[in-house]
Image: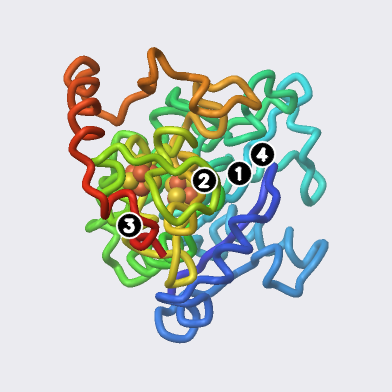
């Protein structure tokens, strides 16, 4: 049995909504098949008021073993470092977070906000928000760079806006079943199993990417969404085209560019708000190239590929 406590800071509850749609395994499976005991969750639990805070205090003083502490949303420090803009159970949420992180065997940050601050921490960051161990790309965050949970791990970041439900439920199962040692993390503390390949891996538009055939409108069945619509699939690490959403689709499969939501720069990158990718080109070539490409080589390749594109790449029959 693994005790799990889930709290929310500066959050929209989007990751909770996503989590409740998990299918492999589902939230019910976590409880019935994988031995997770949900001590309290803001959307799933009935207790309110002191019944909740008493349980949390029991975790902090060691009466209840806290195996997994899940945090959703930003840690809010405003105003002036007090955290008073996000009070919970009679004190700033950031104080609960620090106390619980001290006693938890594992700490899991769910979603961009908990991982690195997300949208609320974007400049000018009026609430002085940050993630548990990052502020955007900068290590540190609310718990500091050196933080390690009781089991010796840093915070496990499961980013996304929201995170895919099965990314969350599968990591929780790995911890609950004693396989946490198999979770290897990248330099942003994301589980490599979900965040090593790019969103582009498995995208049904890869042939259009290769032949530089561009989709020009959202929802268009034909064409790659990179050239005119700014898809960030080639520079975003996620498994959205390998582990499909709702078991059937992804953004790019339905004609919506990847927005790069699993990266700390999300949502603004270097684009001015309101601009589309096409306005960020130099002589018709995108300024922001797929990761690892040489610019001159890419320009030559693009010219050749456009010339070589066969008719089938131009036909509207390939994407679903
Ligand atoms: S639509 Fe996006 S993810 Fe798919 S091939 Fe084009 S750039 Fe890559
Ligand atoms: S396709 Fe891109 S923007 Fe959409 S959920 Fe996946 S990583 Fe995020």
Q: Name the residue rendered at 46%, 44% in the picture.
A: 258
Would you place residue 256 above or below residue 288 in this image?
below
Residue 155 placement: quadrant: top left
Task: Mark yes or no: residue 159 visible.
Answer: no
Label 2 sits on a secondary structure element that is helix
Total number of numbered labels?
A: 4
Q: CA distance from mark 1 to mark 4?
A: 5 Å
Residue 307 placement: quadrant: top left
Name the disc covering residue 204, or none.
3
| Residue situated in front as seen by the camera: 266 or 109 | 266
Q: Name the residue rendered at 66%, 38% in the picture.
A: 94
Task: Mark yes or no: residue 203 visible.
Answer: yes
Residue ID for mark 4: 95
Looking at the image, tell me whether mark 1 or mark 3 is earlier in sequence order.
Answer: 1
The answer to whether 199 appears left or right of 70 in the picture is left
| Residue situated in front as seen by the camera: 205 or 120 | 205
């Amino acid at each position: 049995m693994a005790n799990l406590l889930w709290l929310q800071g500066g959050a929209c509850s989007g990751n909770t909504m996503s989590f409740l749609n998990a299918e492999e395994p589902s939230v019910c499976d976590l409880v019935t098949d994988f031995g997770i005991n949900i001590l309290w969750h803001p959307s799933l639990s009935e207790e309110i008021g002191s019944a909740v805070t008493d349980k949390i205090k029991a975790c902090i003083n060691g009466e209840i073993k806290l195996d997994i502490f899940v945090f959703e949303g930003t840690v809010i420090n405003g105003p002036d470092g007090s955290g008073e803009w996000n009070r919970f159970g009679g004190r700033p949420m950031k104080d609960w977070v620090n106390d619980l992180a001290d006693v938890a065997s594992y700490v899991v940050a769910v979603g961009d906000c908990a991982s690195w601050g997300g949208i609320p921490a974007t400049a000018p960051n009026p609430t002085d928000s940050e993630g548990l161990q990052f502020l955007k790309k900068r290590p540190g965050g609310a718990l500091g760079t050196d933080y390690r949970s009781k089991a010796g791990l840093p915070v496990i970041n499961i980013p996304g806006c929201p995170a895919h439900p099965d990314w969350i439920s599968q990591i929780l199962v790995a911890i609950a079943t004693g396989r946490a040692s198999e979770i290897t993390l990248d330099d942003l503390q994301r589980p490599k199993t979900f965040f090593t390949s790019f969103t582009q891996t498995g995208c049904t538009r890869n042939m259009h990417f290769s032949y530089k055939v561009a989709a020009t409108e959202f929802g268009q069945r034909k064409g790659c969404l990179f050239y005119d619509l700014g898809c960030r699939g080639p520079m975003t690490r996620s498994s959205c085209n390998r582990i499909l959403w709702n078991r059937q689709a992804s953004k790019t499969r339905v004609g919506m560019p990847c927005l790069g939501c699993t990266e700390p720069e999300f949502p603004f990158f270097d684009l001015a708000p309101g601009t589309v990718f096409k306005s960020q080109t130099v002589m018709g070539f995108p300024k922001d190239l797929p990761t690892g490409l040489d610019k001159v080589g890419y320009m030559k390749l693009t010219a050749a590929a456009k010339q070589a594109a066969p008719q089938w790449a131009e036909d509207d029959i390939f994407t679903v």
